[in-house]
Image: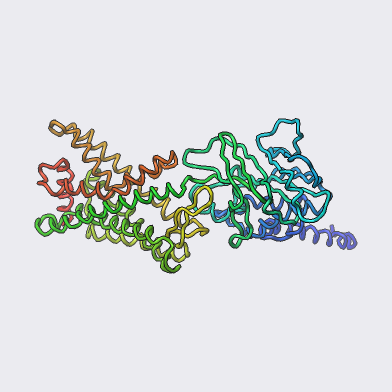
């Protein structure tokens, strides 16, 4: 049945309005995190902007203007003070209190900051809550202008897991984080309040931090960098067993950062240990390379064996990595940006070469001891060399094209510079760091551990059924495994244990920097004496058989 013309004329505008409203609802989520409607603070707009706390992540494709969104929340407190109507805000992500206070108050004022409740003033005879702020009475008397009443806004903001209010310091991949993703804001409108005669106190309750982490009181400095960053100037930190007291001489947004403990003295000691270990390793690695050259000239059969070539390739990459480390740490931030970029790229390249050659050592060991049969590969060592030196080059080229190299700064708990070196530059997107360093190391390390476990099983189970019992046979097996462990990079695995405490950091720095010494000892034991008397003669014979199969 045909629709009456009048009814159609009435429905057409309604349909257009519905279509426009649907289009608007589908576009708003895409535009809400780009910084639109920056001066609107209604309940709908607040919830809309709060959704960006979750949407704006590095791994998401949601377009976000982090700088504008941060300004939106920084200006919200000033809006509350100037609007003069709202006294309390109670949302899942935001708790706020706006209160008129006399500037002639005779007592310090306390306010509760319990995350699940709206901030409230704590009376004199009440027990002090674990999360609270103390505003000294001198604060109100030091405010500019002759006024008898001042309007104060206190907000507790949940910033979620996204990028907002994280800043460059939390983009370094060192485990730093905002405690409970919670900020505390204090404001008296757009009035800039600094250099208070007596600092205010904010107490954050928390459990005892891990042994290698510490808390640092910081405030959001919108003037740092293009979008702002956390800073600690004017703030002191007093860490207790159940809470941390932050004392600051100004008003803004505050929080507690959980950061690794690497103060200046600790970094200095670890650097000296690493430098000494790398220097000693370089001497032993150079001896290994020279010994290989001598044996290659004196033993005809030695030229065709693949295992010594792989050992020397690993030794060479490790020697160059140690050299790059000494140059990078020794030069610090000296030179131009281009020179720093180059040092960071070279250090990254040789680090990846070491990871790759350790993985190739594990692959060759798998062919010798596990697969055994059908192990022929034409131009075997040439192919290994293309992977060992070429794959890291491709990754460094890709990383360098993203301009990821530059000055890297290690800071202590007071945000003071402990060490500067050329590496992945501060504030860069850390995809390259996670993929080409953390992820690549984890893959190569796990592969090496799997192969080492299979070889261990072979040595201690299968060989016992056929081998003639000898005195001290188990000791020889253990020594063999220790030698193989140095080739596949077991000492690098100590990095996984560093979160357990500072002592494991020292152990990692010591043993890992001495990897070259362990490789030299293994190479000398394996090849310098006659192969019939070495504790690892079986490994040598397997490699000879494998090399013969390549010919």
Instruction: Judge left or right: residue 515 versus residue 550.
Output: right
Q: Which quarter of the image is occupied by the N terminus?
A: bottom right
Q: Give above or below for 339 relative to 442.
A: below
- Where does residue 22 sit, x and y in percent of width and height? 74, 57
Q: How is the image coloured?
A: rainbow
Q: How many marks?
A: 0
Question: Which is nearer the eye, 529 or 7?
Answer: 529
- Examine the rendered structure and indicate whether residue 338 appears above or below residue 272: below
Residue 462: x %, y % from top left: 21, 34
Residue at the spot 66% in from the left edge and 50% down from the top edge: 249
- Quarter of the figure that contains the C terminus: bottom left
- Residue at the image position 62 percent from the left and 46 percent from the top: 255
Whole-percent x, y for residue 392 in the image: 36, 60
Residue situated in front as seen by the camera: 30 or 13:
30
Residue pushed farthest right?
6
Dividing the picture into quadrants, the one containing residue 224 is bottom right
Residue at the location (40% across, 65% down)? 397
Closer to the camera in the image, 72 or 253: 253
Picture quadrant of residue 126? top right
Tell me where residue 307 appears, x and y as whole percent: 20, 52
On the picture, is 405 further left or further right than 168? Answer: left
Q: Is residue 466 left or right of residue 241?
A: left
Residue 338, above or below 156: below
């Amino acid at each position: 049945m045909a629709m009456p013309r009048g009814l159609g004329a009435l429905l057409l505008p309604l349909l257009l309005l519905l279509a426009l409203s649907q289009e608007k609802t589908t576009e708003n989520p895409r535009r809400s995190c780009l910084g639109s409607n920056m001066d609107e603070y209604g309940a709908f707009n607040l919830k809309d902007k709060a959704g960006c706390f979750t949407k704006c992540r590095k791994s998401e494709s949601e377009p976000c203007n982090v700088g504008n969104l941060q300004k939106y929340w920084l200006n919200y407190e000033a809006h509350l003070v100037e609007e003069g109507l709202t006294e309390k805000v109670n949302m899942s992500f935001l708790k706020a209190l706006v209160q008129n206070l006399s500037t002639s108050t005779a007592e310090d004022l306390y306010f509760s900051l319990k995350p699940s409740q709206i901030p409230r003033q704590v009376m004199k005879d009440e027990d002090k809550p674990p999360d609270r702020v103390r505003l000294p009475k001198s604060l109100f008397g030091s405010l500019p202008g002759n006024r008898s009443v001042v309007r104060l806004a206190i907000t507790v903001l949940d910033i979620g897991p996204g990028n907002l209010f994280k800043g460059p310091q939390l983009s370094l991949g060192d485990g730093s984080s905002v405690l409970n993703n919670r900020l505390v804001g204090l404001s008296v409108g757009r009035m800039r309040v600094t250099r208070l005669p007596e600092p205010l106190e904010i107490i954050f309750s928390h459990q005892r931090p891990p042994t290698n982490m510490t808390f640092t009181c910081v405030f959001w400095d919108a003037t740092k960098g293009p979008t702002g960053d956390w800073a600690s100037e004017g703030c002191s930190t007093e860490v207790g067993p159940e809470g941390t007291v932050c004392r600051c001489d100004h008003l803004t947004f505050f929080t507690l950062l959980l950061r690794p403990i690497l103060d200046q003295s600790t970094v200095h000691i670890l650097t000296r240990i690493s430098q000494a270990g790398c220097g000693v390793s370089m001497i032993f690695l150079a001896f290994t390379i020279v010994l290989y050259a001598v044996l290659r000239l004196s033993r005809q059969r030695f030229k065709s064996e693949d295992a010594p070539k792989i050992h020397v390739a690993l030794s060479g990459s490790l020697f160059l990595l140690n050299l790059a480390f000494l140059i990078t740490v020794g030069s610090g931030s000296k030179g131009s940006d281009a020179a720093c970029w180059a040092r960071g790229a070279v250090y990254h390249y040789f680090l990846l070469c070491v990871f790759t050659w350790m993985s190739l050592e594990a692959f060759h060991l798998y062919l010798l001891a596990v697969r055994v049969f059908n192990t022929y590969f034409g131009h075997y060592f040439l192919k290994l060399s293309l992977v060992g030196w070429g794959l890291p080059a491709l990754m460094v080229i890709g990383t360098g094209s993203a301009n990821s190299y530059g000055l890297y700064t290690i800071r202590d708990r007071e945000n003071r510079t402990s060490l500067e070196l050329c590496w992945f530059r501060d504030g860069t997107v850390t995809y390259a760091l996670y993929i080409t360093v953390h992820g690549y190391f984890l893959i190569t390390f796990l592969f090496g551990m799997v192969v080492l476990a299979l070889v261990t099983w072979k040595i201690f189970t299968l060989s016992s059924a056929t081998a003639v019992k000898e005195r001290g046979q188990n000791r020889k097996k253990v020594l063999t495994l220790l030698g193989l462990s140095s080739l596949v990079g077991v000492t690098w695995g100590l990095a996984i244990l560093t979160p357990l405490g500072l002592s494991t950091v020292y152990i990692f720095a010591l043993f890992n920097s001495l990897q070259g010494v362990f490789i030299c000892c293994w190479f000398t034991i394996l090849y310098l004496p006659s192969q019939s008397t070495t504790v690892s003669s079986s490994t040598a014979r397997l490699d000879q058989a494998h090399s013969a199969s390549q010919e």
